[in-house]
Image (tube, grey):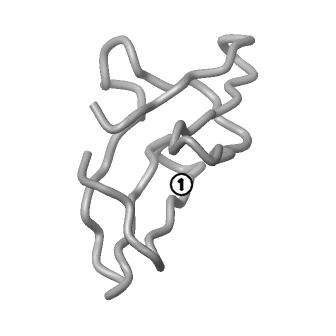
Amino acid sequence: MAVLHPGDQFVLNRQDYKIYKINAFQEIENVFGGLDYGAGSLRNPVDLQMRDDNLLFVSDTAAQEFIVYDFY
């Protein structure tokens, strides 16, 4: 992933279980998660939260766990 800039957003799409990083210009910059993402796959994500240290936490009820994404 790239560095976060003011105005960047993360959107959880519950139809394909993917997370979209949208930049300040409202362009999709990165897509990750979903059913086919390997170790970072999501089966039934319900919520995402960004911490101050730029870690993105996603709660997945089907897997009964939190998935943590960082910039790498």
Q: Quadrant of residue 21?
A: bottom left
Drawn side of residue 45 relative to residue 31, left or right:
right
Which residue appears farthest toward the bottom when viewing the image?
A: 25
Task: Mark 1: give few (<14), some (14-19) or many (20+) Cα within 10 Å.
Answer: some
Q: Position of residue 47 (x, y in %)?
A: 72, 43
Q: Position of residue 68 (x, y in %)?
A: 54, 25
Indicate the secondary structure of the residue bearing disc 1: strand
Residue drawn at (50%, 59%) of the image: 10
Q: Position of residue 16 (x, y in %)?
A: 46, 45
Residue 42 lies, with reference to residue 6, above or below; the image says above
Q: Position of residue 70 (x, y in %)?
A: 41, 33
Most foreground residue, 65 or 50: 50
Could you tell me which quadrant the N terminus lies in? top left
- Residue underneath mark 1: 13
Most foreground residue, 9 or 46: 9
Residue drawn at (31%, 25%) of the image: 37
Most foreground residue, 14 or 66: 66
Residue drawn at (45%, 76%) of the image: 6
